[in-house]
Amino acid sequence: MYSNKAVQAWVEEMAKLTKPDQIVWLDGSEEEKARLINECLADEELIELDQQKLPGCYYHWTHVNDVARVEHLTFICTSKKEDAGPTNNWMSPTEAYDKLGKLFDGSMKGRTMYVIPYLMGPVGSLFSKVGIEITDSRYVVLNMRIMTKIGKVAMDQLGDSTDFVKGLHSKGELDPEKRYICHFPEDNTIWSIGSGYGGNALLGKKCFSLRIASYMGKQEGWMAEHMLILGIEDPKGNVSYIAAAFPSACGKTNLAMLVPPETFKGYKVWTVGDDIAWLRIGEDGRLWAVNPEAGFFGVAPGTSMKSNPNALLTVQKNTIFTNVVLTEDKTVWWEGMGVEPPKKGYDWKGNPWTPESPEKGAHPNSRFTAPASQCPSVSPEWQNSKGVPISAIVFGGRRAKVAPLVYQSFNWEHGVFVGATMASETTAAATGAVGVVRRDPMAMLPFCGYNMGDYFSHWLEMGKKIPNPPAIFNVNWFRTDEKGKFIWPGFGDNLRVLKWILSRCENKVDAVETPIGYLPKVEDIDLSGIENEVSKSVLEGLLSIDKDSWSEEIKDQASWLEKFDRLPKEVKSQYDALVQRLGL
Ligand code: SAT
Ligand code: MN
């Protein structure tokens, strides 16, 4: 137990409600980890993988109805409904505490309550914040142990303070009818019941680091964003940092761990984070970022030595695999791993599986949980308590026609508009219609903890306060030709685009002014080594602005912006200016 009185009192109160058989306070030690793993193995909550081939690695199956975040069961519980805004589900705090209180009542009977103090962000950093998660899941404890810094280190940072996020989690009955993920930003509180999966249960991740933290950032003058952070080292050894936001299925983790093309001699990409950035204005007037997380909770399918060697190398030890294929010889496999499937194994439901089975072996949302410190490309600065200075913010999405490969916004305010109207088209991989445009402002649609209109205002306010703000860009790796084939090679070759972005930040290249923003001159994108694949004329196509598509696009943007009751006037005037520039 720890001496902080506020933590003790709250844990006592939650124990009265949930009635566990015993309470275990986590210290974060190796002995504690070994003990928990042994308990999990005895209960088959974890399966030990081949410790020769995959040392420290374990396998976990979730319940078959509990395999992804549940946005329709995720609520923002502000006292006023308007404060949750038009893009969030809302429940009143009274109703939510009452409804979930009944589900939590006695939910830990016969179970152990684990108290996990955890630190988000580098030790001793001004950026960092402490949370306490109470859970009845050992799997959650072991995942939180990888994704955050748990135990004494967190309590040391907290000291006697009452400034911690209170997270209560119980698996409950794992019944989707009794599953709720409720956020109380006004009380620094998260209540989650009925799920044991990732973002529903690892409360340090989306619940705290994005939903609660975005609200804190608005109050306190900083930003919590759904962004990867990477550093690009040039052949002279200078490193510049980029923060980038993409909706899901746009290759965020791959970009964060990019391997430069062979012709980019002397370049190196450093991974600071793959999912979340906390950003603050530094003493030098620039925007600085830390990754609050300590691990990667990455999608396994599609991760191969070709798409993301650094991720694959990261997960060779001390990793928890969830819902992938468990092979007969106790290793793991998933679709798109780039190696032969096992002759025999078990699928994500735990059923016997062979390559001939009609269904996929790994769940499309199956995951690895791995320490960031193991990533071969992890930045030497990733735990720097001051963070890293951000030169450029990059937004992006999956657009078959409308968005060019890259463009730069005219200024911060225009960049906020670009972020606010960000969109991605659905792919065949998801169920439902293909090519449907989904707006996802700053990739924060499911993660903004308050009214999205106020969130846009906060972005605008921050822009006024940052003396030397990063430039804002938009990228699209996913333009297709008439046959629906991707035109741009993507992956490591995306560095060619990032290089242009940094040249713009350093005022080293001119650009072409167009109605939507500044575009590269064709000769300014370095195509060395891929001239055969991407000729100058192909690149011209990738950088073209198709009037018909943009005519559709602005109509769709207009109806999107109408949704917002608190749309800042600046966003509306940026829209009007775009329409005017396009002459439509
Ligand atoms: O489940 S998580 O929220 O952690 C990952 C995701 O769905 O983006
Ligand atoms: Mn994410």
Image (cartoon, helix red, strand yellow):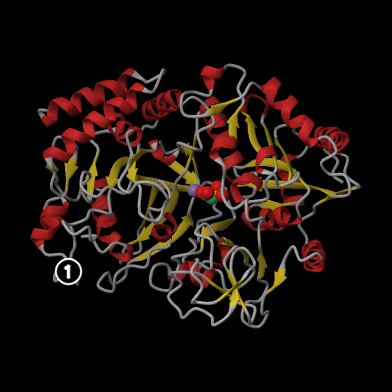
Q: Is residue 164 above or below residue 319?
A: above
Q: Tell me which residue sits at (68%, 79%) in the image.
A: 51
For the C terminus, the image quarter is: top left
Q: In the image shown, does 191 or 268 lie closer to the viewer? A: 191
Look at 44% across and 46% down and name the residue there.
Answer: 227
The location of residue 187, given as percent across then percent down, is: 68, 26
Task: From the viewer's perspective, tell me whether residue 209 is left or right of residue 439.
Answer: right
SS for dot 1: loop
> Which image quarter: residue 4?
top right
The residue shown at (39%, 32%) is: 466
Indicate the quadrant where residue 553 lies.
top left
The residue labelled by disc 1 is: 533
Count of numbered labels shown in the rendering: 1
* Horizontal and vertical percent position of residue 120: 62, 46
Q: Is residue 386 above or below residue 11?
A: below
Q: Position of residue 475 (x, y in %)?
A: 28, 48
Instruction: Identify the residue at image location x=35%, y=64%.
Output: 237
52 up-or-down from 430: above or below: below
Looking at this view, name the residue that lies furthest to the right: 21
In the foreground, 248 or 430: 430
Whole-percent x and y of residue 224?
50, 38
